[in-house]
Image: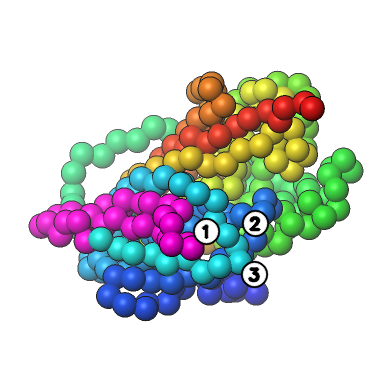
Amino acid sequence: MSEALQSLLDLLDLERIEEDIYRGRSRSAVVPRVFGGQVAAQAMVAAGRTVPEDRHAHSLHAYFLRPGDPGAPIVYNVDRLRDGRSFTTRRVVAVQHGKPIFTLSASFQTYEEGLDHQAPMPPAPDPATLPTGEERLRSYPHLPADTVERFLETRAAVDLRYVDDPPFGDFGTPREPHSQVWFRTNGKLADDPLLHVVLATYVSDMTLLDSVLLAHGRGGWAVGDVVGASLDHAMWFHRPFRADEWLLYDQQSPSASGGRGLGQARIHTQDGRLAVSVVQEGVVRVPREH
């Protein structure tokens, strides 16, 4: 296991301070606030620790309410909304400085047999043929060195490989609002299903709004031609998967309007199983010229 992955696992390992109350640490992201994927992942850890081991996460729905302060701990309060025969529901509120910054509802289910079908996996090149994240980032001379280093630091726990140039690598001309990345953790994980859900939740917030930027030829926060933040985030976990094995994150944007952009995505395992569906809306604004 890489040192960066162990550091991330330590970050996501919450401290229990009271019944159904947990505390997590924070760290800076590429932008000067807590990375949304971190808060969502920590909230799933908090929810999962109050659920029987035989019930696995099947969905989450979250709202980002305020920017998180990377210099302060985050307290996670868990409400046990329902414990049914098949389903368990939890609500988590993340608090900093006495105010909620994030809310999450998550549902867990016991295993059941049932109807089974899925959308086919889209075509994508083998991840082994693609440049690593570091190789791709360092190939763009227009990116400031400190921006590249921040990207590499915040993504060091994950091997994330773009199929095509990301928005910040090739911008100025609109492209199809479609983006693909392969990802896996930089090291093996334990066999805890919740841990793999938590790591996929963490990574899912890294690139989902890229497809919005592509549609308008914008480079994004890395080059400063838009400002934005996640507003809400939803995930449905369809089939078991491992976050330490290659996963294809196929993302597209059907709409942007009113200063908001919508991203939709599917995550497939390398052998073609549809593992996760993801939807996110975010603020995407063009800076005003003074």
Query: Circle 1 is placed at which residue position?
Result: 38
Q: Residue at x 43, y 62 (%)?
A: 98
| Foreground pick, 40 / 2 | 40
Q: CA distance from mark 3 to mark 2?
A: 14 Å
Q: Which residues are magenta?
A: 80-108
**How packed is label 1: few (under 14 Cα within 10 Å), some, or many (20 or more)?**
many
| Residue 41 image point, x, y percent | 46, 59
Examine the rendering and report whether any part of residue 124 can be seen. Answer: no
Residue at far right of view: 141
Sequence-wise first label, 3 or 1: 3
Q: Are marks 2 and 1 in contact (CB under 8 Å)?
A: yes
Question: Going from the N terminus, do you reach mark 2 or mark 1 first?
Answer: 2
The reply to whether residue 227 is visible in this rendering is yes
- The amino acid type found where label 2 is placed reads Ala
Residue flagged by tag 3: what amino acid is it? Answer: Ala
In terms of sequence position, does the residue under pointer 3 or pointer 2 come before the other? Answer: 3
- Left or right of 83? Residue 285 is right
State the residue at coordinates (57%, 60%).
69
Q: Helix, strand or loop at disc 1? A: helix
Vertical placement of residue 219 versus 190, above or below: above
Between 180 and 66, the residue placed more toward the observer is 66
The residue that label 3 is drawn on is 4
